[in-house]
Image (cartoon, rainbow, N blue to C red):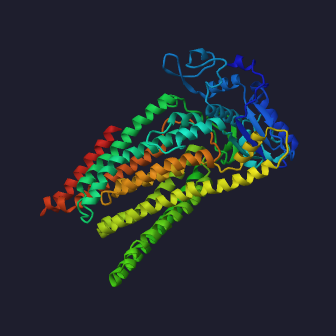
Amino acid sequence: MAESWSFLDAFEPNFRPLVVIELAKGTKEETIKWFTKRIVDKKANGGAQLLVKPLVTESGDENIYLIGASHLRLLLGAETVGLVKECNDNSMRTFTYSSRKTFKDFADDNHNFLTMAECQYIIKHELENLRAKDEKMIPGYPQAKLYPGKSIVRRLLTSGILVQIFPLHDREELKKLRQSWYGRVKVGYQPLDEIRCYFGETIALYFGFLEYFTFALIPMAVIGIPYYVFAWEDYDKYVMFATFNLLWSTVILEVWKRICAIMTFRWGTLLMKRQFEEPRSGFHGVLGINPVTGREEPVYSSIKRQIRIYLVSLPFVCLCLYFSLYVMMIYFDLEQWALDYHEENESNFSNLMLFVPSIIYAVVIEIMNRIYRYAAEFLTSWENHRLESSYQNHLILKVLVFNFLNCFASLFYIAFVLFDMKLLRQSLATLLITSQILNQFAESLLPYWLQKRHKKRMKKRICSLKTDTDLSLVEQVNLEKEMGTYFGTFDDYLELFLQFGYVSLFSCVYPLAAVFAVLNNITEIYSDALKMCRVYKRPFAEPTANIGVWQLAFETMSVISVVTNCILIGMSPQVNALFPDAKMDLILTVALVEQMKLAAESLKE
């Protein structure tokens, strides 16, 4: 590959903009010249060997730059990042430029061999690997220190010189994708391969999991409707449904693993080698030598990090959990007040008042979840984790623990302390439906409405410009740079995780939980698709082989579901009737069934 770089020229007659870089207004000229020179410089000189073109508007500001690359440069970059492509013999292999003719659909004049998402991922990789050589600072900004091996783009971002970097939408491809994805209401599968080609594997896997989970909920919904209709007033006839719940919550996750492996093998990411993980952009410390790479970079004591985690973060999380339980007890006081009011008045209004405490509590839960999320992000960032994966794992753990207790503690209390199945059904229904309505509004409807208003203002402003530059490109870049940034699938998976908890833990006492989950997920597919295509900037593709730590989170919830449903079965009057005089036998039988189920799950692993 080293010989191939010498034939690569920075000139490309048909420049195709793929990525946009926005610098801060007033960025010094020497900084811009140095940065753009490093982008176009040859690899041998420490550059990225990419193409740069300023986006010039009537105002004359040159703080926005378009980044592209020649076809040959992208092919060599595909080898650098280790993309896996299908060969002519239908096998999957890591792409190499020297053996390019052996790959399916490859031709020297076929510029569609690499998807646009893959091209943008390659450019992002090359930009992030632009490293300082002998510079001690960013030219023009002596306070922005550099050292050999430091990522230039990360330093520009943390210094505020580089405002943002994002991939451009392809209007024609996006129009086709929208039409096949959510352009019309239809019963069928999503175009996951097309989503993957446009947005990358991480986004495609999320929508694949959302679709699969929705289909997996259908048997629960089909069984739940007649169960709900014919046993509505008899809250104790839930044994059969709880037994089905036991099997369902485990089987669907095992089947998903296989479906996920099939998809990622076809996409080439299952066999893709994991890239060496660079330090996070927010990581800071004293300059030292990395013992693994031998490069000079910030070093931070792991002891200091552990002190921050165990002496600050952990007590704070425990305090938040205590506050959540305190709010829960206030909710039960409100429930008792509503019940007393109903017993005194017994009117239609008093009937409605029975649902008011649950609705208020559901709204409070959503507000607390969102406030805690910001606090968890601040704390996790303050802990100063070196790697992005470590940061994400600690953040997910904090958020999941709080959300689990905040959303489900009241249901466990009602089921196993109050033993009130009627209140459990009412609370579950109210929490589930209210949270779904609030999430749909906050995550899709509100951002879409705000984006639509902003788009109208931007179009009026852009149409008033008089410029010789391609107006459609100027308009597109200006519209997209003002769009919201999509911060990943964290919130989307979290919503599905909580929904899985509502359905798998206590839906045996409210069989319509799966029905509402299916209806919510159908609208979620369309609203999330709309959000990705119309509301947010296009995210960079991120190759991945699975849904990551969320698989473990769902499996943990499945184990809790097994324990919960076994206890509910043991509490039921039907099972108690089998052991009228031997409560210990009943406890041992339930414990045995529970352990056998958990053992079966561990054997599958």
Counting from the top left corner in percent of width and height, residue 174 is at 61, 38
Q: Residue at x 39, y 51 (%)?
A: 557
Counting from the top left corner in percent of width and height, residue 334 is at 42, 76
* Position above or below: 509 against 598: below
Counting from the top left corner in percent of width and height, residue 188 is at 44, 40
Q: For the view shown, which residue lies furthest in the bottom direction? A: 344
Question: Which quadrant is the N terminus positioned in?
Answer: top right
Looking at the rendered structure, the number of numbered marks drawn on it comes to: 0
Q: Residue at x 42, y 48 (%)?
A: 554
Residue 501 visible within the image = yes
Counting from the top left corner in percent of width and height, residue 160 is at 76, 49
Residue 308 visible within the image = no
State which quadrant residue 209 falls in. top left
Question: Which quadrant is the C terminus positioned in?
Answer: top left
Q: Nearer the viewer, residue 74 or 154?
A: 74
Side of 49 relative to 314 (left or right): right
State which quadrant residue 442 falls in. bottom right
Side of 560 relative to 588 (left or right): right
Q: Residue at x 46, y 43 (%)?
A: 186
Q: Nearer the viewer, residue 350 or 574?
A: 350
Side of 391 relative to 243 (left or right): right
Q: Residue at x 29, y 59 (%)?
A: 228
Side of 390 relative to 403 (left or right): right
Q: Nearer the viewer, residue 589 or 360?
A: 360
